[in-house]
Amino acid sequence: MVLPERIALWRDEARALERGDGELPRDPARAATLYCQAARHGDAQAQFALGWMLVNGHGVERDEVQAAHLFAAAAEQGLEQARGMADRMGAPRGDTPPCLKPALPELPPPVRPAAPQLPPQMRGLAPGTWVMVNGKPMQVPTAVAAATNRARPAALAQGAPGQLPMPDGPLPGHAPPAIVEFVRLVAPEYRLSPQLVLAIMATESGFRAGAISPKNAQGLMQLIPETAARFGVRNPLDPAQNIRGGMAYLRWLLARFEGDVALAAAAYNAGEGAVERYLGVPPYAETLAYVAKVLPAVGVLRHPFDPKAGPPSERLALMRQPIRVR
């Protein structure tokens, strides 16, 4: 994850290059490149500044289509000066520009212990078979034979839908034991891993049952009133109801994005509409930071999902283009 300080440095250098301030000579092309870099990481001011350069042809080729997208993204993050430009230009048209396609970090590959090597005389033999090795009788071990003689099913190895293994990483040590135990017991009802539920909960509320956000998101899973009503939660500040409502929403999101943890987490934070509009994680600083916290805590990019929970997104095929990771 790129630190906010680094993103601010890109933006400030771009501003100096755009204007020719200080010791840096004016270089609009380099300024646009740095603004783009910061914009991809969700910096609303960089999104607005790049949009301004594009709409005015300020040292770069004029492009009102890209500018409209950039102003809209900055406005959606609450940048006041972007709202007027976004209203003036209307709804963005065409594909999301590259400068609004975030680059999320890949998870490191899991470290798997190497299978013990069998002597050549034992390979391919059934467990328990006796064979002479260097003049001594030896029996093929059951566990080793299973590990070395049977190939892992290709579909499972590639994470095919319906055969994805549940995450089995550690649970957060700072979570209240009562909450952890409740989640461990209830999460399987929703085909969810405790790791995913607790990662969302930690990021949303820090395990504070009475948390209420400025946008009126409430409780451990920070349900807004509309989401609470949608999933049958009558009292969002009741911990059990709140957790179940959040689990029901997560189950629905995983079905909509067919197990993609980054998309489901981004949708939980910014709404599924924003994910579908941007064909991936929206270029919002808050959402990018949110996803960057959840993914390592869950430990997988794909999670089992329940196709009966809801239909997949109609835009899912477009999202599967390899643009979100580098």
Image: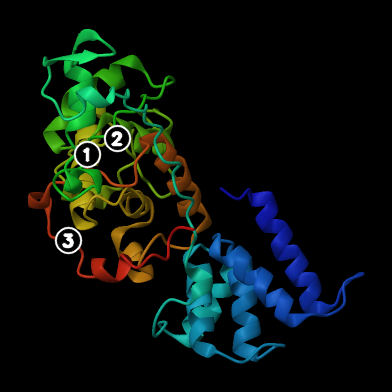
Question: Residue at point 36% right, 64% down?
Answer: 274
Circle 1 Cα neighbour tier, 10 Å, few/some/many (<14 / 14–19 / ≥20)? many
Residue 197: numbered disc: 2
Q: Which residue is mark 3?
A: 312
| Disc 1/disc 3 C-alpha distance (Å) | 18 Å
| Disc 2/disc 3 C-alpha distance (Å) | 21 Å
Find residue 57 and report its horizontal and vertical position in percent. Answer: 65, 91
Identity, as a three-letter code, of the amino acid under mark 2: Val
Residue 148: numbered disc: none
Q: Which mark is nearer the camera, 1 or 3?
A: 3
Question: Residue at point 32% right, 37% down?
Answer: 221
Identity, as a three-letter code, of the amino acid under mark 1: Met
CB-based contact (under 8 Å), mark 1 and mark 2 = yes
Find residue 97 and report its horizontal and vertical position in percent. Answer: 48, 77
* Residue 285 visible, this angle: yes
Circle 3 Cα neighbour tier, 10 Å, few/some/many (<14 / 14–19 / ≥20)? some
- For this rendering, which residue is in front, 215 or 270? 270
